[in-house]
Amino acid sequence: MNSMEGLVTQIQGLSSTASDVLMLQNLLKQANDSLHAESTRLLPFLDQLDPSKHSLGYLYFLEACTAGPITKEQASSYVLIIARFLSSCVSEQIRLASHKFISVCKRFKDQLVLLGEPLRGFALMLTAIRKFQSSTEHLTALHPEFLLLCLLAKSYKTGHSVLEEDIFEVDQPKDLFLYCYYGGMICIGQKHFQKALELLHNVVTAPMFAVNAIAVEAYKKYILVSLILHGQFSTSLPKYSSSAAQRNLRSLCQLYFDMENSYSNGKIGDLETYVQSNKERFEHDNNLGLVKQVVSSLYKQNIQRLTQTYLTLSLQDIANTVQLSSVREAEMHVLQMIQDVEIYATINQKDGMVRFLEDPEQYKTIEMIERIDSSIQRLMILSKKITLTDELMSCDPSYLSKGCRERQKFDFDDYDSVPQRFNV
Amino acid sequence: MASSSSRGLTFKLHPLVIVNISDHYTRVKSQLNLPPSLTSTSSAATSNNNNNNSNGGENNQQKPPRVYGCVIGVQRGRTVEIFNSFELIYDPSTRSLDRSFLEKKQELYKKVFPHFYVLGWYSTGSDAQESDMHFHKALMDINESPLYVLLNPAINPAQKDLPVTIYESELHVIDGVPQLIFVRSSYTIETVEAERISVDHVAHLKPSGGSAATQLAAQLTGIHSAIKMLNSRIRVVHQYLVGMQKGDIPCESSLLRQVSSLLRRLPAIESEKFQDDLLMEYNDTLLITYLAMFTNCSSTMNELVDKFNTAYDRHSRRGGRTAFI
């Protein structure tokens, strides 16, 4: 216990300047094992430390405390302590011991899940992420934890705000997989199917040695979402996906492939019988809700196909072609689609005719200017980043060793002096 | 013989004319130089040189050929703008000008460019000569005071200006005899967007160690700095007005009057059709810029991917990527 007290005083003394903190870190590293040995008796020491000033020391103590198995009663008290720590810690100090911080947060999440109260946690998790990230483009191990809490708490909006940021740096590949998978699920929950498709696409085409479970689950959802959004699904993965994925994913998701076959026939009856017969398997994958959305989207796809053939159509004909039960239902569907700006049409209620129109966008408005302008700005930023990465890559030793071997002798007469591109 | 003109006409020359003249000259020179080297052996050529044979081909080897042609354009008030030119057949020894050809060409050009008419003629050489006056007088029945555009084809790397001079003819009394003499006039180069791009292109065929920036980029930079200056000046006026409103600066009604008169000059047109057209064109330009950015970005991305593949693709061009390194 003496060593613990000595450690506490040292922490209190050495937490003021950056150089002191580094010295403190070395001391703590050496004392790590003794801390872990005393894990059960460390709780009173935590009160002597102030998390906002002595974040590093507090972190070490906290991590040692929570290392062992925790019962439910202890969990709630620990949750309070960790919550207080997360809201008041200092980012420079915790970044010095990133692994410990990550493991503390993970345990925080586990305890919340254990208690069944994810709502308490995700706001704090968000602050933790903000303190831990070196920039908003940095994907940490905390992101998937945060998204998981959002999913469990069903608060998709906060999760979505984190998803809005573009990611350029990733610590661990597993983080990326989980992040994209959970992110896809959050977007599905918010019905932003386009973004969900992008995120799930990332998971499926990410480089991997062997197929992992996250990719399989993501692929199943990917098939369903692309059916909802586009009404079709390309059965072959793009060329840049890993060979492991290309070979194995298909066989693991055969059920969904067959669903795609019956979907493309366009017959509601077939699709519904297929879904009924495989209901348990869909439930097992927790995809039943999504599958039901796929079925309802088949109506939309059929109506959309009608816009390409007919200029005007009566509601009765629509109901017949799309196999809806009544004219009323057809009208509801078409109205919903017009509201969601999925088709452009006018319904004439007097004679029950629907006229399909062209896209009325004239590109004459100021809003369009602002939209294009913001897209150009985003693209400029992206272009700068890519140029930077390109330059970094040119200096990369493995590229230089391989690339320069392949290139022929530089013929100066053939050198084209016209600039290849305009540098922004 | 050549002195500065005091007429007060301003001349504007388009680069198309210069390119045309130089092209004409180069073509004639390269075409005429071929036959002597094909027909005679090298020793015979040198012996012919020594004998000072006045063979037509020999002449051309020793003296560069002169080319002749007409320049056409528009004259509006005191401004003469030379847009285009075409070639003529003229033999200085016999002083015969192919009139029918000239008239035919004139008619053809009149059909395409109804506003243009013959403003003068051009030739190549280092300086205006006495014999040129005959051609000049011959053209006087088409245009009462024609111009003479002279291009010096000798390449002088030290020279910074264009080797193009424009001469006018003036009636001067020399030794009691009224004579027409050539007087040099100043001119400016005027370009249209399309000409700028083509001159750019032509200039780049021969890398002469000039600046890396293209002419288009230079012009856009000019516009950009002009807009920036306008922006900063407006900001200054704005700050001044805000200061006056707050009361930090004493009110000066004369300045206020000036500012309000400036503001009342804009907007110049205020109608719905104008708004529509303006926004549509604005959107079109933005879309083109967007497309250009996209292309730029994709090309960078392409290079990056190529580099990545060469660096990390252990199984050279097999489908699929290897793991995170």
Image: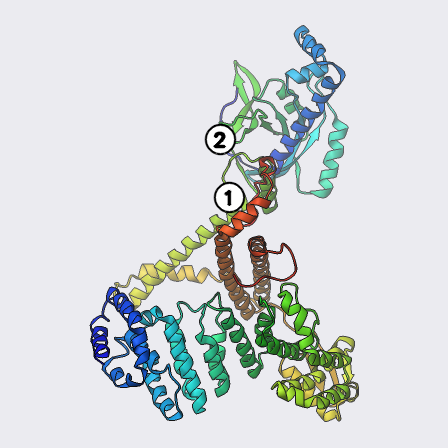
The type of residue carrying mark 1 is: Ala
Q: How is the image coloured?
A: rainbow
For residue B299, what is the image quadrant?
Answer: bottom right
Left or right position of A392 against A239: left
The answer to whether dots 2 and 1 both sit on one chain is yes
**Subunit bearing disc 2:** B
Q: Position of residue B180 (x, y in %)?
A: 58, 21
Q: Residue A3 or A407: which is nearer the viewer?
A: A3
Left or right position of B3 against B138: left
Q: Is residue A67 above or below residue B317?
A: below
The type of residue carrying mark 2 is: Lys
Dot label at residue B308: none
Q: Residue at x 51, y 72 (%)?
A: A174
Q: Position of residue B47 (x, y in %)?
A: 69, 8
Q: Position of residue B127 (x, y in %)?
A: 56, 21
For residue A415, what is the image quadrant?
Answer: top right
- State whether residue A349 appears in this view: no
Q: Secondary structure at mark 1?
A: loop
For residue B134, what is the image quadrant?
Answer: top right
Q: Position of residue B238 (x, y in %)?
A: 36, 62
Residue under label 2, please give it. Answer: B160
**Subunit bearing disc 1:** B
Label whose residue precedes the other's in the sequence (2 or 1): 2
Q: Are marks 2 and 1 in contact (CB under 8 Å)?
A: no
Q: Secondary structure at mark 2?
A: loop
Q: Residue at x 63, y 30 (%)?
A: B22
- State whether residue A328 appears in this view: yes
Left or right position of A273 against B303: right
How many neighbours does mark 1 have within 10 angstroms: few (below 14), some (14-19), or many (20 or more)? few
Q: CA distance from mark 2 to mark 1?
A: 18 Å
